[in-house]
Amino acid sequence: MTDCNLSQLCISKKWPEVRKYLSSDAAEEEKKSNIMYRNVLGETRLHRACSRDAPDDIIKAMIDIGGKELVMKVADYDATPLHFACITYWCIL
């Protein structure tokens, strides 16, 4: 799977497909590379998942693969994935 495909799955909220990829036999380095990939705004796939209210198990799987480095990634406009999660949660209240 390419980073573009993973991004599209997150944007489209196709969580069963994201879950399937994250738990697949694909090499951990490949999965980490796809999750850590940054778009033109500096957002990782974790930013995308958090902005789309992804299920907890998907967020956890991404963090397990990407580690602290992924969690601490800051987009070009100084937002971490946690900022996205908070904004998304606040908007659905």
Image (cartoon, rainbow, N blue to C red):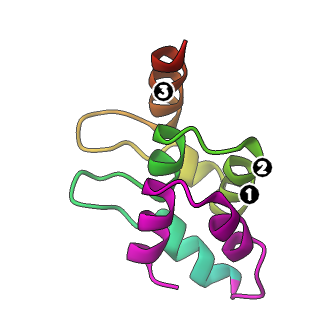
Label 1: which secondary element: helix
Does 77 sit above or below residue 13? above
Quadrant of the frame with the C terminus: top right
Does 52 sit above or below residue 83? below
Label 2: which secondary element: helix
What segment carries the magenta color? 1-27
- Whole-Å distance between the Cαs marked 1 and 2? 6 Å
- Residue wearing tag 3: 88
Between discs 2 and 3, the one toward the N terminus: 2
Label 3: which secondary element: helix
Residue 50 in the image: state x and y as whole percent.
53, 40
Q: Do the CB atoms of the residues marked 1 and 2 lie less than 8 Å apart? A: yes
| Mark identifier at residue 61 | 1
- Whole-Å distance between the Cαs marked 1 and 3? 19 Å
- Whole-Å distance between the Cαs marked 2 and 3? 17 Å
Q: Pointer 3: residues within 10 angstroms few (<14), some, or many (20+)? A: some
Does 50 sit above or below residue 7? above
